[in-house]
Image: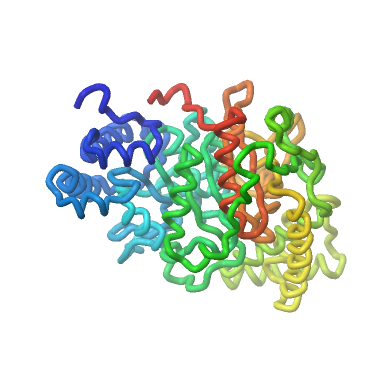
Amino acid sequence: MTKSSYPQAFESAIAIGNRVKRGTLKASDLLAAQIERIQKYDQAVNAVVVRDFDEARREAERMDRIVQHGSERQKQMLGPLAGVPITVKESYDLKGLPSTFGRVEMRANIAQSDALMVSRLKQAGAIVMGKTNVPVRLSDWQSFNPIYGTTNNPYDLTRVPGGSSGGGAAALAAGFSFLELGSDIGGSIRGPAHFCGVFGHKPSIGVLSGAGHALPDALATADLVAYGPLARQARDLRLAFDLALGDDVSRHSLLSPATRLSKPSGWRVALLSDAKTCPVDREIVKGLEALGDRLENLGVKLQREGPPIELGQLHKLYIRMLRAATSRGLSDQVFKEQAEVAEAYRQGIRQEKKGYDYYAWMVQANTMSHREWLQAHEQRMALGRVWAAWFEDVDVLLCPVASMPAFHHRQSGERWERMIPVNGQQQPSTQTMFWAGMSTLCGLPGTAVPAGQTAEGLPYGVQVIGPRDGDWITLAFAELLEKYADCGFKPPKDFPG
């Protein structure tokens, strides 16, 4: 292979696929380079924890045979991801490999077929090399479990890559993979994208299918959860979204960007860089405000305020709906114990802390009655109407993805007990889910875009939120940010391309 044809670890997935189809890059050479890179660097990162290299080699060789000796019809049928090596989150089924969700008791849960979105990317030519790390039950903004261990952030190995799609974001940032599939209910795509400096898209609720992303004991899809792609470039993210969408009927209900949005001056953008409900690191706030300045200089119509919603109410309601959605995983004994605690709060024997009390909200949500859930759902629907009315005059809202950049590993104690320093003050690690809930509660699309780096060289992102079913709108704005506003992926210094 000549130097000019050698694959670059941080190249666009679209560009790589085009090179394979033209025959200027062999899929088997590309895959060999990626495997070599994983074997060289992943011991430090621990991102690609389930490997399927032999099957990937067979598929790459098949791709090369088509390019070199196939009929014109076979060549024309090669998809846009022809020969592109990718990874998927451990929780997605990949035939013949375990799907454990980080749970030891699920080691023997071997997938009998591929998840739907995995199969759609394969049909487009993608070669799946393996699966990436997650926290136990996908329930943390870190990625560690007793089966596969701890995943580290490529920008600083002493810090977290985020969770629960943390292994995937780390794999992209380190140049191991060209695309990734994740899932998100509490920021599990957007948080890792923010911490690892890549793009991630949490679709509008129900747009992309989660078929093949569940353990055998869970037949129903949980409320609030969404499934979506991560990538290093905005156009790769859009392509992965479209391929995963396929010919689903939901495609026909998605909102197309208006003609005026073809240029920066046509956009109407709101910026909310900070909130008392969840204070944000000053460096991130400063960076997002500077981004707002750049957008104004491009002619974007910018307002520096969010929607007319009481943000504290939104956050508490989101935590209640989130924990209610995940409560089916509680054992009978834990449910009984939490019900007793929740009753103590209701009777005033225990008092909620003022402002933020994750534990109180959690136990009450985990044990709420169906009538209480219906009442909370009505509140959610009312907020959805406020969002819809507001988005008649605003195209997208820009806000933080999280309140801090990647933090140092914290694996002891319960999540709500772990404290993270933000501007010199200790903030519960769960509080930063406020920013995830901004879009998740009412099923809005949220696209995480790399927006800059702190003085320590840690990436941070900006979240682009749009109207319900406005996925193509937020993805289009992500491309605008990358093209015009100095946003985008910047490789970690210890992982050269």
Give whichever of 427, 13 is nearer the camera.
Answer: 13
The residue lying at 36 percent from left, 45 percent from top is 86
Q: Is residue 375 visible?
A: yes
Quarter of the C terminus within the rendering: top left
| Residue at (60% x, 58% y) in the render | 255
The image quarter in which residue 410 lies: top right
Q: Quadrant of residue 358?
A: bottom right
Taking 162 as reference, is 308 left or right?
A: right
Note whether 4 is above or below 199 in the view shown: above
Q: Is residue 345 left or right of residue 164?
A: right
**How did the renderer colour the structure?**
rainbow
The residue positioned farthest toward the front in the image shown: 259
Residue appearing at x 56%, y 55% in the figure: 203
Q: Give how far across and how far down residue 494 sits, in percent.
A: 44, 23
Q: Examine the rendered structure and indicate whether residue 102 appears above or below residue 294.
A: below
Point out the residue furthest to the bottom here: 371
Report the front residue among 439 and 55.
Answer: 439
Horizontal relation, residue 113 to residue 485: left or right: left
Q: What is the x, y in percent for residue 411?
A: 56, 43
> Would you say 96 lies left or right of 339 here?
left
Evaluate whether residue 407 shows in this view: no
Q: Quadrant of the N terminus?
A: top left
Front one among 36 and 483: 483
Tell me which corner region of the image, top left, top right, bottom left or bottom right, holds residue 197. top right
Percent x, y of residue 298:
68, 30
